[in-house]
Image: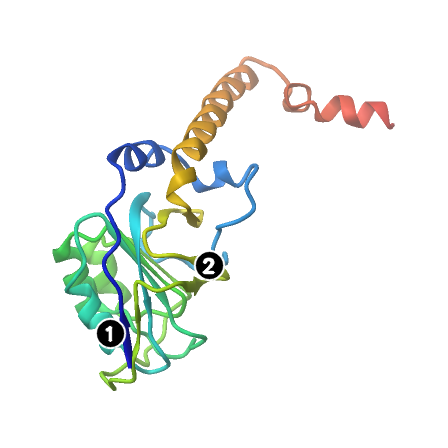
Amino acid sequence: MYTINDMPLPLDPRIVEALGQVETATVGHWRLMGFVDPTIQSILRPARRVVGTAVTVAIPSSDSTLLHHAVGLVRPGDFLVIDRLGDDRHACWGGGVTVAAKAAGAAGAVVDGPCTDTEEIEASSFPLWARGVSPITTRLHDLGGGLNVPVSCGGVAVMPGDVVLADASGVLVLPRNEALLIAERALAIQRRSVDREAAIARGAKLGELSGASSKVLARA
């Protein structure tokens, strides 16, 4: 059986613009939730930073029937989040799915499992994050699955319509009602970081600027 729910509303363009300037690692300075397992990495080298609307897909074991259907529903700006329901052997994403997703205007995709056809993915410049590579692919076994249902990806609960920010450091999933505030805080941190690096280039000491040296000396 298949569970098929409506496609989520697209993101507010302000969220896309603001988060498009944010590094996932900047958010990691204070936030602990929403980061997928770090073993899920960008297939593209160098990675691209992308922001998109989470379109969730849950597909079992060796079957990718629902993924093929879902790619046909993808809109520009959507980001496919694929829960493999524990399977780490079969690659559901390869060259053919990449071509279809790129043609649909997808912002990117993350697979909690392996992919294949990495040379084709790299040649297409399609932003994909996956848990390694496998030569064993899925088939159209028609086993069922869920589209736009709550899923788990890299240990993170993802709801359809969530905000996905992905870059060279990893993949971050955010509730859309928190995204703008998180972006504003991250951008402020990045601006301070630029100022700090400029000060260090002029001769300032990192430990003095960060406060680390005073902590060490107080307990030395």
Density class for disc 2 (Cα within 10 Å; few <14, some 14-19, many ≥20) is some
From this view, report whether residue 18 is shown above or below residue 68. Answer: above
Estimate the x, y position of residue 124 in percent, counting from the top left: 19, 56
Viewer-side residue, 132 vs 23: 23
Density class for disc 1 (Cα within 10 Å; few <14, some 14-19, many ≥20) is many
Residue type at numbered disc 1: Leu
Marks 2 and 1, Cα distance to the nearest angstrom? 20 Å
- Report the residue at 54% width, 20% height from top: 196
Residue type at numbered disc 2: Ala
**Element under label 2?**
strand
As drawn, the label of residue 157 is 2
**The C terminus, quarter of image:** top right
- Report the residue at 30% width, 44% height from top: 50
**Element under label 1?**
helix
Viewer-side residue, 133 vs 14: 14
Q: Is residue 198 left or right of residue 165?
A: right
Estimate the x, y position of residue 203 in percent, counting from the top left: 59, 14
Estimate the x, y position of residue 166 in percent, counting from the top left: 37, 47
The mark nearer the N terminus, 2 or 1, is: 1
- Report the residue at 40% width, 69% height from top: 113
Viewer-side residue, 123 vs 186: 186
**The N terminus, quarter of image:** bottom left
Viewer-side residue, 7 vs 125: 7
Q: Is residue 195 left or right of residue 127?
A: right
Tell me which corner region of the image, top left, top right, bottom left or bottom right, holds residue 202.
top right
Do the numbered discs 2 and 1 sit on residues whose CB atoms are within 8 Å? no
- Report the residue at 25% width, 86% height from top: 141
Residue occupied by mark 1: 66
